[in-house]
Amino acid sequence: MTSASCASSNELGVYVHVPFCASRCAYCAFYQSPPRRRDMDSYAAALVAEWALRRVEEPIATLFFGGGTPGILSREHAARIAGALIGDGDSRPREWTVELSPASARPERLRHWKDLGVTRLSLGVQSFSEKILRALGRRQRSGDAEDAVIGARAMGFAVSVDLIFCVPGQTLADWREDLRRTIALAPDHISTYVLSGDEGSSLAARLPQLRRAATAGERFCRLGWDLLGEAGYEHYEVSNFARPGRRCQHNLNVWRMGRWLGLGPSAASQWRGRRFRNVASLELWQKGVELGRPCEEEEGPLTESILLEDTLIFGLRLREGIGRRRLEDRHGENFRRYLPLLERWTANRWLEECGDRLCLTDRGLLLADALGLEILCWPDGSF
């Protein structure tokens, strides 16, 4: 799918949050719950019921199971959910991604997901170093990742690998080795994330150490850009790289401010002119579904100002940038009030015009998070 066709698409993406995890990684602040059988039974029933309550009357273009650990779902639970969302007909998502930990990507589990119709696996490798894995609180062994990627590719899945850098104690040589071993496995897609101490994670207590590690972030980023580019990966978003034709279509729909529906506790939606998030509680979410009124928070209309703000923040994270004429035609005066900010970025060589498109430079991409904060604070404040 080309950039132009996807950008103009009105297709629906669906995200399913599977909250169950056997243990919490040190860097994780996502909502999760222990994998008790009775809770997983009631979760699957409630998810099917929530789907019915949302009254979706169109096919799903992209489907993404995230978590948590979606790979922890039993064959029975996964089949029940899949049957409700996509049925047994020909109208299947063109891209269906499931996040898996390498330790859960055993051959029989992979075959189970393949039989259901999953097309893409996102493997949380994070690192091949036992030292780094211990620092991150990961339970897997280094060899689990290689086995998982090789097994998934042999079964015909498109494979994405997640890596984390700027871990305290990690050197550039460690990072180079992680990149080398990932490239050698030839996945279709690679995501590289700088470690952050998100509020609610156990690493948050180590913020001073994390900040010292982040000062080396530019060197880590540029090493990743160089090595992955030389290996034939397209750097299409700040943290994401793909072989030609292998971009994550579900995430592109989100970054381009399309439409998506989130199911399950804590899942967020941009759908039918509203923004909302399901309550981050398995119990409260289930009770709301049982009463026929899904329990939502952060609920509100999708106003033009909110849509423009997020179009700028997320669109500029993409290498392709955003069409300036489209912004002017759709948002008019609301867009023009950001022009002084964009002009300053251009003067600082963080932003450039590529034909009709506004694109961040390499230096701008390194500052993408800070520039996003400037958009949020404009024009009432600046960083």
Image: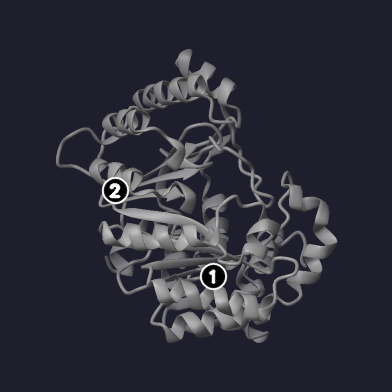
Visible residue check, residue 58 = yes
Specify whether 228 is left or right of 348. Answer: left
Q: Position of residue 45 (x, y in %)?
A: 40, 21
Residue 90 or residue 382, whichever sits in front: 90
Q: Secondary structure at mark 2?
A: loop
Q: Secondary structure at mark 1?
A: loop
* Amino acid type shown at disc 2: Ala
Specify whether 116 is left or right of 89. Answer: right
Q: Position of residue 324 (x, y in %)?
A: 46, 72
Residue 160 or residue 182, whichever sits in front: 182
Label 2 Cα crowd, 10 Å radius (few <14 / some 14-19 / many 20+) = many
Which quadrant of the rendered structure holds the C terminus? bottom right
* Amino acid type shown at disc 1: Val
Visible residue check, residue 273 = no
Q: At 81% across and 70% down in the image, what residue appears?
A: 212
Distance between the alpha carbons at the discs numbered 1 and 2: 24 Å
Q: Which mark is residue 196?
A: none
Outermost residue to the left: 90
Label 1 Cα crowd, 10 Å radius (few <14 / some 14-19 / many 20+) = many
Q: Position of residue 76 (x, y in %)?
A: 33, 28
Against 226, residue 107 (above or below) is above
Q: At 37% across and 72% down in the image, what residue appears?
A: 186
Q: Which mark is residue 61?
A: 2
Outermost residue to the right: 208
Residue 57 image-quadrant placement: top left
Circles 1 and 2 in contact, beta carbons < 8 Å: no
Q: At 55% across and 65% down in the image, what residue appears?
A: 163
Residue 50 image-quadrant placement: top left
Outermost residue to the top: 291
Count all numbered tags in the image, as a single digit. Answer: 2
The numbered mark, 1 or 2, whose residue comes first in the sequence reads 2
The residue indicated by pointer 1 is 238
